[in-house]
Image (spheres, rainbow, N blue to C red):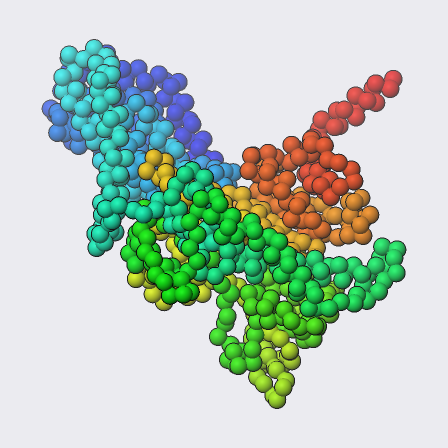
Amino acid sequence: MKRFLLLSLILCLVAGFFYFDLNQYLSLSELKNRLNSWDTVIEDRLWLAASLYFLAYFALASLSLPGAAVLTLAGGALFGLFGGVVLVSFASSMGATAAFLLSRYVFGSTVHKRFAGRLQTINRGMEKDGAFYLFSLRLVPVFPFFVINLLMGLTHIKTWTFYWVSQVGMLLGTIVYVNAGTQLASIQNIGDIASPSLLISFTLLGLMPLIAKKIVNVMQQKKIYKQWKKPNKYDRNLIVLGAGAGGLVSAYIAVAVKAKVTLIEHHKMGGDCLNYGCVPSKALIKSSKLAHLMAHADQYGLQQQQPRFSFRQIMQRIQEVIKQIEPHDSVERYTSLGVEVVEGYARLVDPWTVETKTAEGETTTLTAKNIVLATGAEPIVPPIPGMGDSGYVTSETLWERFLHLDQPPRRLVVLGGGPIGCELAQSFARLGSEVIQVEMDSRLMRREDADVSEFVKQSLHSDGVEVLTNHKALRCERHGEEKILVLQHASREVHVAYDELLCAVGRKPRLQGFGLEALGIVDRMPTNNSVLSTNEFLQTSFPHIYAVGDVVGRFQFTHTAAHQAWYAAVNALFGRFKKFKVDYRVIPWTTFVDPEVARVGLNEQDATEQKIPFEVSRYDLGDLDRAITENAAKGFIKVLTPPGKDKILGVTIVGEHAGELIAEFVLAMKHGLGLNKILGTIHCYPTWNEANKYVAGEWKKAHKPEAILRWLERFHRWNLK
């Protein structure tokens, strides 16, 4: 109501200005006609005249009314160059700031609620470059200042920054116009002042902040590199450390554009995803799902039977799957593409020089114009007393540790309730292990909505996993051959016996051992939460050293690492001409529990935390024909949209094939397609993809035009007569 009343008052004042034709007094001819009478007032009451002039100018600027140019001339004509500049400079800056604050107060919250997503990027830019950008605009009078005032009020630029930049930025233009006012008699029209040559000069002047910014960047780089001596010549255009997804794609892109590139890997090509993560875990999930289907074959009209298998053979199959995919990421393949692949331990001895030691002890040294760090991540092992003595496995070590077991672990404790812990807990439970999953938080998969977490918990429970949330691991004990994990729940201790302990509490960026501490790229004592800090171009503290993948830490997904790799490689090789900001707007991911959980964009808890208004359209897969035929009629799709609009803010899918179903929404979000477009697209029957169309239909039902439908009903009744 306060905003409404204030806006009403402003509109009334503006309307009154035009209704009473007050702008007639702000013409050049009127100023000349009344100049003598004003001179008399100034001679008698200088301070009163100056005060009235200041207030008039302030009101004009704050209400964004026309006539500022003529009033500025009047300042020079009435008060001289010095007095006019002082009055106009402060009145215009303060009036502009008042308009800025009015815009922010009246429209700011509404605009931010409605366009929160779009304004995030603008506000981040304003926080970083707002003063430079505003200064450039203030130096170019061809751009209406009142528009600048109103638009800046919708950003997060600080009020004080807006004021002082406006004060300084408008000063030169103020001096030009006030000085012209001192020669008012010779001026026939405003164009005599704002000549094309003068406007061109101002425009060129407006480029000065950008030039200044470039100079600042050069000076900052000199400061960064001052203690280091650049090589006179480089051996490589690009050196990439790490041959996981991020490193492989970086090297691939570089060699594709004919750059000279070296890829260094100290362990296995393909990184964690191929050797320890995505590939082996999905192979295990498939075997465990087949065992689950055999045990529940009666649900499909078949005779159920307890699956008989050798766990050793399952683990050997996993290794065979890895071997089948290995050629895609092999040394041979990348060498054939033109990449120099070096197997060894890499260390940066200075910002451009990489020293590599092979397993045989040989050392080679190469210099590079640019470097990409793609060193990946490793499992976090919490400092739980006794855990090292009793033994444990991680998502990396379990594949070798369990490779030769004839049976899966009889009693398995899984520490951690994130995606890795949930996937492995369910898989081993389906293969016959007695699994207890321990999570110190109040629920599993904390990044997902509460209803998703509960759905996953129930799915795990139905497969025999005992889920203990709000349980904190205190210590591991051994009593003879018996291993005990001691947990704290509320104020009491809980003892859990186990044969194997799987630690899956998260992953941390692999930062140590590469010389990054000596260069100051990372802290000397990184913690589990430490990540390699980069800017929007994926540059580290050294502009020619980039970082991608899990080491950056924001999204620890293989597909995100590959996505970042394109930006890092292109920026490294062509950044002197054009750099690209990495785009994180549409990042999907899937947790491969059964049923799967897939996400893209915002979920309900994200939107609530970010105070983004939303509504939810939901479709239960229990109604989907294809799901019913496959006895998989469980799960749901949730789509978040702005109130009253079909724009997709985010999607969560829980159900069979969720990882495949999410792709249509990813495409729609990437290209700005709404739910109406999905609803209007033909989907084959009977398929799982129909669910995407049906959830769009749920949105449409909730927004059907009731008034129009009532009139149509009347029309059809009339048409029966």
Q: What residue is drawn where x is 61% and y is 82%?
A: 483
Residue 220 in view in this figure: no
Closer-to-camera residue (126/112): 126
The front one of 32 and 81 is 81
Residue drawn where x is 24% and y is 49% of the image: 230
Residue 65 is situated, as x and y percent measured from the top left of the image, at 34, 24
Q: Quadrant of the C terminus?
A: top right
| Quarter of image, res 570 | top left
Q: Is residue 237 left or right of residue 716?
A: left
Nearest the camera: 190 or 503?
503
Q: Is residue 83 left or right of residue 262?
A: left
Query: Is residue 310 positioned above or below 75 on the image?
Result: below
Residue at x 59%, y 44% (from the top left corner) = 650
- Residue drawn at x 28%, y 35% is 210
Q: Quadrant of residue 198?
A: top left
Residue 248: x percent and y percent?
48, 49
57 shown above or below 464:
above
Query: From where the camera sits, is residue 196 visible?
Result: yes
Position of residue 605 in the picture relative to residue 428 (left or right): left
The spot of residue 124 in percent (x, y) is 40, 43
